[in-house]
Image (cartoon, grey):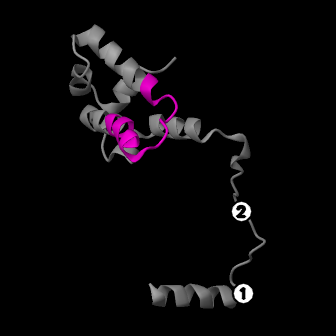
Amino acid sequence: MAELKTLVTQWFDAGRFDVDERVGVFDASDTDPCETFWTSFVRRPAMYLGGVSGWRLYCFLHGMRRGGDWLGLPPLPRLSEIVDELATQSREAYGSDFAAYRVYDAPGLLEWLAP
């Protein structure tokens, strides 16, 4: 790491980097970070889950729900609503809160949440 830091510092000092040049700077002042997360998550669940199985989605959502409590973090907005909606639809379709996670992959389950 020390060698890498030295090389980056030399590159910067050689004038190959312009501090004032900003290409593609993202202004997050108008965005809701929570909504941005959920939009990205629904668009590419495998990026967050490491795969697309329904089981991975179940573990991810329930881990977020219970892990935040354990860490003393405030609940992520819409998380409970999403988990509860999936459980309700699973119960109505299969008689179990969990069964749909075994039948569908993550993108299929996330389609259930579409308005």
* Disc 2: which residue: 23
Q: Residues within 10 Å of mark 2 (few under 14, many from 20)?
A: few
Q: Position of residue 54 (x, y in %)?
A: 27, 32
Residue beneath the point at 43% across and 26% down: 80
Q: Residues within 10 Å of mark 1 (few under 14, many from 20)?
A: few
The residue under label 2 is which amino acid type? Val
Q: Position of residue 74 (x, y in %)?
A: 49, 39
Residue 72 colored in magenta in the image? yes
The quarter of the picture where residue 111 lies is top left
Residue beneath the point at 72% across and 46% down: 29
The quarter of the picture where residue 19 lies is bottom right
Most extreme residue toward the right, as rendered?
A: 20
Q: Secondary structure at mark 2?
A: loop
- Label 2–label 1 contact, CB within 8 A: no
| Magenta-colored segment: predominant secondary structure | helix
Using residue 25 as the reference point, say whether residue 57 is left or right of it. Answer: left
- The answer to whether residue 73 is above or below residue 61 is below
The residue under label 1 is which amino acid type? Gly
Q: Earlier in the sequence, mark 2 or mark 1?
A: 1
Residue beneath the point at 38% across and 35% down: 65
Residue 15 badge: 1
Q: Position of residue 4 (x, y in %)?
A: 49, 85
Residue 49 badge: none
Is the N terminus in the top left, top right, bottom left or bottom right quadrant?
A: bottom left
Q: Secondary structure at mark 1?
A: loop
Q: Position of residue 87 (x, y in %)?
A: 32, 19
Residue 75 colored in magenta in the image? yes
Using residue 89 as the reference point, say whether residue 79 is left or right of it. Answer: right
- The answer to whether residue 104 is above or below residue 66 is above
From which residue to which does the magenta span run?
Answer: 62-81
